[in-house]
Amino acid sequence: MIEAVGLTKRYGAKTAVDDLSFQVRPGAVTGFLGPNGSGKSTTMRMILGLDRPTAGRVTICGHPYRSLPNAPRQVGALLDAKAVHGGRTARNHLLSLAQLAGIPAARVDEVLGVVGLQDVARRRSSGFSLGMGQRLGIAAALLGDPQVLLFDEPVNGLDPEGIHWVRNLMKMLAAEGRTVFVSSHLMSEMALTADHLIVIGRGRLLSDMSVKDFISANSADFARVRVPTGDPAEREKLTASLIEAGGRVMSEPDGALRVTGLPLPRISDVAHANDVRLWELSPHQASLEEAYMRMTQGVVDYRSTDDAKAGLAEPQQGPYGDGSGGYGAAPGHGDPRPVEVPQDGWYAPPPPGQNPYAASGRDAAAREAPAASFPAPVAAPETAPEPSPAAPAGQQTSEDPR
């Protein structure tokens, strides 16, 4: 179990964590949420003894991290997946950690299989993608088979299969009775993974409750009710009856009714008592993201503004000379005057009955004769560009034997 009591951390005039108290219990996945700059990473660093608190204390299983005997055997953590020597292979990185903690070398190959990196175990980590680096960091956290695990953004850079794997891994570890503490900004993933939530903002505790209770406390559940269309009298009668029963009714843009303050069975009873047919009666529950946004809207430090881009755009001449920039209207579409486009090696033939090359002193008969045809000069064929070379044609995990 992880326990923080009055935990405070100041950096000069900046208070990163302010009198924070909470417990992370075993047997459940506890999500650690908060906006950027709220103090989540600082709190995790103090849990692991990397930063000393200004005030208060934090313990793991009743002891500060630095007092734990052979801490890697008891606590596993992933705070920064890039904290790896790039010149080492994945196996050598884990092997060095295992030797420092007195962990058998066979365990290295086991965790490489668990995270799906057994096929790249002898590749240098500098060539790993972001997702592969995350898997290697998770392997390092699992190396000592610890009872307490901390993960900071564990699914960062993972593909959908990897995210699904991490979700199941967290649940499996918690089901084994371990303490699992996970920080993440992905609300949809936390909704599927976490059992309990600790939410902080500007270093202070905002919420410490189950996911279900958090959503209920920070959102307004409602029932969506729809009556047959084309019968406004039925709709008005049901609205009046629901208000009389203690509910609050609002109209939806599509004609449905949003009802709060009454459970679904009560709404159904009211409609039946007033002989009103219902075409829809469905519950609506807010998502974790909606509840989180509502809870933290007053403690967000970094807010974006609209990008006006004033004065950056410059007018450009279009390819058809319309001066509007980009691709203007083609000749004959918006501009009646054709635009002459010079073409090397080609000349327009003379109009019928006219010979611009005839001498001016010729008689009328000569002028009335058909114009002589003059072969048009032919442009030299352009050298065809050499064909470019064709583009080249376009991790399974294993069970943790422990």
Image (cartoon, helix red, strand yellow):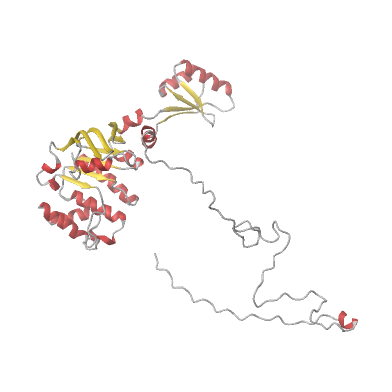
Q: Report x, y in % for residue 126.
A: 27, 61
Residue situated in front as seen by the camera: 248 or 320: 320
Could you tell me how many numbered marks the image carries? 0
Q: Is residue 325 left or right of residue 126?
A: right
- Residue at the limit of the structure toward the front, as seen here: 13
As displayed, is residue 224 above or below residue 15? above
Percent of width and height locating residue 77: 21, 46
Quarter of the image holding residue 68? Answer: top left
Image vertical order of residue 148 relative to residue 206, above or below: below
> Which residue sits at x=67%, y=69%?
341
Write down the quadrant of residue 335 in the picture: bottom right
Which quadrant of the view contains residue 368?
A: bottom right
Tell me if residue 127 can be seen: yes
Question: Is residue 275 at least partly visible in the picture?
Answer: no
Q: Residue furthest right?
A: 364
Residue 249 position in % (x across, y down): 48, 23
Decide if residue 275 is on the left or right side of residue 44.
Answer: right
The residue depicted at 69 percent of the width and 57 percent of the height is 333
Residue 244 is situated, as x and y percent measured from the top left of the image, at 47, 15
Asked if residue 42 is positioned above or below residue 143 in the image, the reply reads: above
Of residues 73 and 43, which is closer to you in this image? 43
